[in-house]
Image (spheres, grey):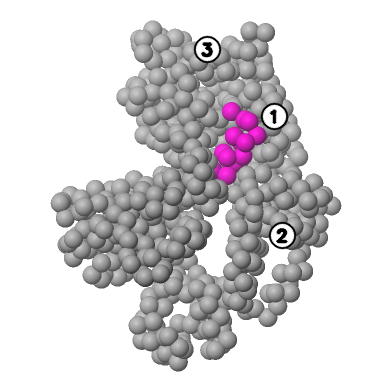
Amino acid sequence: MPNQWTNQEIAALFFRIADILDIQGEIVFKVVAYRRAADAIEHLGRDVRDIWQGDPKNLRAIPGIGKEISEKIDEIIRTGELEYYKKISKGVPPGIFDLLQVPDVGPKTVARLWQELKITDVAKLEKAARAGKLRGLKGFGAKSEEKILAGIEQHRRKKSSTRVLLGVAYPFAHSIIAALRAACGDAIQDIAPAGSLRRMKPTIGDLDILVASDAPEKIIDAFVSLPIAREINAKGSTKASIIADNGMQVDLRVLEAKHWGAALQYFTGSKEHNVALRQIALAQGLSLSEWGFKRVKDEKEIFAPTEAEVYEKLGLQWIPPELREASGELRLAQEKRLPRLIELADLKGDLQWHSNWSDGSFSIEQMAEAARARGLHYLAVTDHSQGLGIARGLTPERLKEQWKEIDALNKKWNDFVVLKSIEMEIRADGSLDFPDELLAQFDMVLVSTHSALKQSREKITARVIKAMQNPYVDIYAHPTGRLLGTREESALDLEEVFRVAKETGTFVEIDGAPERLDLDDVRVRRAREVGAQIVIDSDAHSPDGFDGLFYGVAMARRGGLEARDVMNTLEWKELKLKLKRHKRKVK
């Protein structure tokens, strides 16, 4: 029986192996090989076992996986262990890996700290730095100790901080930017968030904000004086850090405009993307840092005032921040084949939201007017069906009453359509709340799971597939059922779901509600590869909830989708022709 290691667990093991080899001074190519393999598996988008199928040779189809590493994956899947890892990790103190998380402490430094001073964890490092013992190492001095102590404090704060939903962090960061612009005016030449927020990851740790200015003192003073600053962690001439009143740590850096492009690229990340970018630079005789380029042969500085200039200097297309996860984007940029990513304005309609007929807070008319104001052309009303009693799910009788209201509204507008739809609960056995005779009367039907999410992989997959095979089921919503930070995703076999979605013509959804963001970027990419058709919905329960479309588009962009990959970029008359219920009628 194959071992049930997940992709993430295998990737984490290979990242750990790379760290050990790096600390042990192994040749860089071997270290890079394990990191590349780890990254490939982490972003695979399908279960590695589905590719493996009992033969390690099959794994070589994965970019970055060669013969040696494919055999190691085979061993992990078959036995649940890896002898090579046991061998190289023998005698390596566990705390060593925590040292690598301290800013400015790299593998070579860790090796020296361990070998020369017997420092094997962060606590020992802090004690040695405070006692002035690091100065005994060649190249270390008082300033080095201060820098390490500051890094330890930063590491400690990050470990203790909780991650925040993108839908909370994004507007908060932009409110800070707006406040700084108001306070500093023309002193700010440019300002932007960086880090994981700019890459639009589903959850965010600390906030990083960069400012280009010739008046750093003014910017720093304004920043630490913001009303949201509950505590000042640090205040320097060009950098400051605060704890905001919502508990988030916000770090600010001010730099000269000539460094802006390189700094924005560097602090946006990801780390893996930046490492690969620096390797490309070195191959061209250049070193790249947050300050710009230097020619290796004579150390001549080459500034990059814009991000586009950073990538252009290296012969690359400018890469949208959402793609910078070292998942193949650099190769595409070298070949000038990056996708033209979907934008919010491309969406013509929203196919999942809720009114006060079920668990929403506003009337259908109020929600429709809000959607019209945002430039949408149609909405599909998807209040819950009776199987979800906690959400005041609709009975057939109440549904008929709702349809009368929808008919009246559609007579009111000639530039907007309200579609008759529903979010149908898939019961534990795969059956649906309403018979086919009623489902056939909807404009479209969306199905989802809210209960029995802890069913086995086989049961929940069979349950969902049974529903998707219904000729009147058009969309499968928030597929994994996850709630970020509060509920893990189900054991659903998404590879099989995507295959059946393509086979049956059922759309799969990216639910943009900030607490869901389901599908994520890795699964989005895989769904497109398999050929499943995708829609982006807000799952709004109030007019403000339509912001979910923005966050859903962010997940689509992270997954590399173009407008043509998303079905609700079509007008309703065009989309209607794509529904399997329409194709069934035509036949």
| Residue 299 seen in the current view | yes
How much space separates mark 1 and mark 2, taking CA atoms? 31 Å
| Image-quadrant location for residue 147 | bottom left
Question: Looking at the image, is 72 positioned above or below residue 472?
Answer: below
Residue 411, x across and y down, in percent: 38, 7
Q: Amino acid at mark 3?
A: Lys
Question: Looking at the image, is 179 positioned above or below residue 110?
Answer: above
Instruction: State the SS at label 2.
Output: helix
Q: Which residue is mark 2?
A: 69
Q: Which residue is mark 1?
A: 500
Count residues near mark 1 (Cα–Cα under 10 Å), then give few for <14, some for 14-19, many for 20+.
many
Closer to the N terminus: mark 3 or mark 2? 2
| Image-quadrant location for residue 266 | bottom left
**What residue appears at the point 60 percent right and 22 percent down from the top-left corner?**
474
Residue 276, x across and y down, in percent: 51, 58
Which of the labelled discs sits on residue 400, or is there none?
A: 3
Closer to the N terminus: mark 1 or mark 3? 3
First to last magenta residue range:
521-533
Instruction: State the SS at label 1.
Output: helix
**What residue appears at the point 60 percent right and 49 percent down from the top-left corner?**
43
Q: Main secondary structure of the magenta part?
A: helix
Left or right: 200 with respect to 179? Answer: right
Which one is in front, 219 or 32?
32
Q: Amino acid at mark 1?
A: Val
Which one is in front, 532 or 149?
532
Q: Quadrant of the C terminus?
A: top right
Closer to the N terminus: mark 1 or mark 2? 2
**What residue appears at the point 74 percent right and 61 percent down from the top-left corner?**
68
Residue 389, x across and y down, in percent: 57, 30
Q: Amino acid at mark 2?
A: Ile
Residue at the farthest right position: 1
Left or right: 214 with respect to 129? Answer: left
